[in-house]
Amino acid sequence: MLVPYFPPMRPDETLYSLICRYFIHTGSFTWANTYTELFGYKDVKNISIDFPTKINEIIKRIPPSWGITEEYLIRNCTLFPLYRPFLETSLAQDVFKMMRNSNEGLILTKLGLRWDRDSNIYYCTVCSIDDIKKYGETYIRRIHQVPGVLVCPKHGTILSKIYRNPSRQELPFITKEDMNSSTTQSFFIEEREQNFLWDLSKDLSWLLSNYEKIDCSSICERYFFILKQKGYILHLGKMKCKKLLEDLINFYSCDLLNILGLSHIYKKYHWLFELISFEELKLKYYPIRHVLLMRFLAGSVENFFNIEISKSNIQAPFRDGPWYCLNPAATHYKQKVVKEIDIKYLNSNIYVGIFICDCGYIYTKRGPFKDEKDELSRGRVLQFGHVWENELLRLINQGKTLKVISEELCITIDALKRVMVEHNINCGWKLPQNYVSQKRTFSLEKKRDKFRKEIEQTLKSRPDISRTDLIAKNYQAYHWLKQHDNVWINSIVVNVRIIKKNSHYKYDVNLDNEVMGKVQDLLDNWDSDGKRPTRITKRRISELMNLTTRFMLSLPNTTSLLNSSIETKANYLKRLADWIIKGMQEQQISEKDIYQQIPIKYPKKWFIEYVQSKLGLKSKSD
C-alpha cells in the first residue's frame, strides 16, 4: 500500500530524520503504526543513521511519480558517500546492496566497524534556530552525525547531544519545544581544540560532498607519494613510524586526539600505521582518521587531493627513463637516449643515480629531479667513453687550445690535463709523482657478477644458513640484486630454509599428561568455594596454573582437554543465574533482581526465557 504523504527532503537530511518527521506530520499514535506504513511490519528496531537498511521497503510504498529512488536516499540521506572513497569497488557495491534489503549488523561486520559505536543524536543550536525560522521546524543533518564531528562546520559552534537508546523503537528527535530541555547535553572544549575540530568538520563536509571524484587507489598513491616526499618512507619502503606519530601528535596535541577517542601512545599496531597497507593498496574504513592524516600532510583534505603527483616519481626517484645523455661530444647530446641507470643510496633520504649511456659516457646525479632543468645538470663524470675520447683527439690534432677544448667538452682545464696524461697524449706537462689515476670503468654486469659471487660463496661456505642470516650477512648484495636482478635472487632465496619459531622445542608426553592431570583437578574443583561463579576460560586456567596459555597449547592432550572444557558465554550466564536464584531462595525475587546482578546491559530473548522458566519451576515446587 502506497503512503499518501512523505516529508519534503531538506538539505543534507538523514533518512532517520525523514522518518521522525513523517511520524510527527502524520500524527501517528505509535511508532509501530509508522513502521508498518513505511516498512510493512511493526517490529523495526535500531534505525541506523549512518547505514540504514531495508530502504527498498520504503521505496515500495512511495509513489514512483515522486521521483524518490533507493539510490537517491542512499547517496543523499546516509553516510555511505563518506565511506565510499575508502572502499574497493566490489565492497562498495556489496554495502550498497545490503543497505537496500539487509540489516545493519551485516554491514558493520563486512566493514570491520565497531558495534558499540555512538548512537546518540547531535545537532547545532544555531542551525536549528535558522531551520525553525525558515521551515517552521528543524531536522537532523548528516554531517552532524559523522563520527569525529563535534563542531558545526557552518557556524563553528559545539554540537549538542540527545541521548538515544538503540534498543527502543522510539526515535528521539529534536523539536523547538525541547531544544532547551535537560535531555540534551553539550560539551566543553578549549578554544584551540575547538578551532582544530572546526577545521576537521569542514574537511569531512568537503569529503561528503565530493566523494564521487575520489577513488581508493588514488588515496593510496597520494599517501605514498607525500610521505616519501616528506622523508617518512625510506628507499626500501620502510616507514619511520615513531617519527610520523611524534610529528602528528605535535601538530594536533594529545588533548585533541583524546577528545576524538584516538590513542597517542606509540605501539606496533597503532591506528595511524594501520590506516593503509601500501603493498595491498587497502584502506581502513575510518574517515576521521584519514582526515587527520590528510590535514597533517597537506593542510586540508581539498589540498591533499589537489596536489599533483607523478606516478613515475612514486615508482622511481629519477622518474621513468629514458634519460638525457650529457656527453657534449655525442650527436645525441641532451637527448633522452640513456636506458640504463643504477641507484646508490647514501643514507635514508639521499641517493645518487649513475646514468650509463651506450656511447660510454657515465655520469652521476643526486635525486630526485625537481624539474626538467634539473634533469640537464650532472654531478661527477665516472667515465668519458670512446666517443668523448675520440673527439678530444680530433680537437688536439686540429691544434685547438686547452681553453677551447675544455669549453667544447664541458670539462675544467685541470681535469682535461689529467685526462690527457692518463691517455698518454703528448701535452708538454707531467702530473705529480704521488698522483693516483682516477680513470675507471663502470659496468652493471660486473657489479651484478660481483654480488652474485658473494651470495654463492656464502651459501657454499654455510649450506645450512637461514634466510635471515643470509640477508644480514650480504645486506648490500641482496638488496642490490633485488632491485636489478630480482629473478635470479628469488630463485636462490626460495631454496634457503626459513627458521620456524619454537623449532627447538621437543614434545614431552609425560609433561603433557602431568599438566593435563593438574588442569583436570582444577576443573573438578572449579567454584567449589561457594563464591560468585567465574567463567571457565583458557586465560583464567593459565592464570591459576601459573603457566602461559601458549605453553599449554603446545601440549596436545592438555589442549584437547581445554577445548572440551571451556565455557561459552551462554552457559556461564545460565550457571550464574542458577547460583543467584539458589542464593535468594528465602526471599521474594523477581526477574529484575536477577538481571541487576548479571553483567549484561540488555538481556537477550533466550536468556529472559531461561530465567522465567527457572522462576516458574521454583514457584511450582513451593
Image: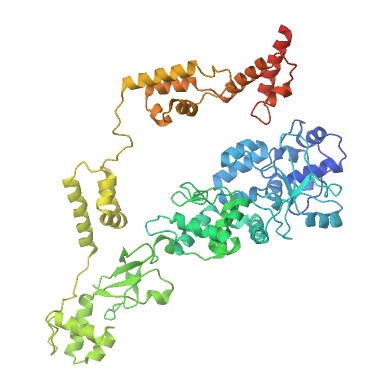
- Between residue 255 and residue 179, name the one nearer to us: 255
Q: Is residue 63 visible?
A: no
Please report the residue visible at 36 percent of the width from the left and 66 percent of the height from the top.
350
- Between residue 462 and residue 543, name the one nearer to us: 543
Q: Is residue 105 visible?
A: yes
Left or right, 477 with respect to 122, comes to: left
Left or right, 333 with respect to 21, comes to: left
Query: How many numbered discs?
Result: 0
Residue 22 horizontal/vertical position (percent):
82, 42
Please report the residue visible at 75 percent of the width from the left and 30 percent of the height from the top.
43
Q: Is residue 384 above or below residue 111?
A: below
Left or right, 367 with respect to 493, comes to: right
Colouring of the image: rainbow
Which quadrant of the view contains residue 202?
bottom right
Residue 341 horizontal/vertical position (percent):
31, 65
Report the quarter where the C terminus lies: top right
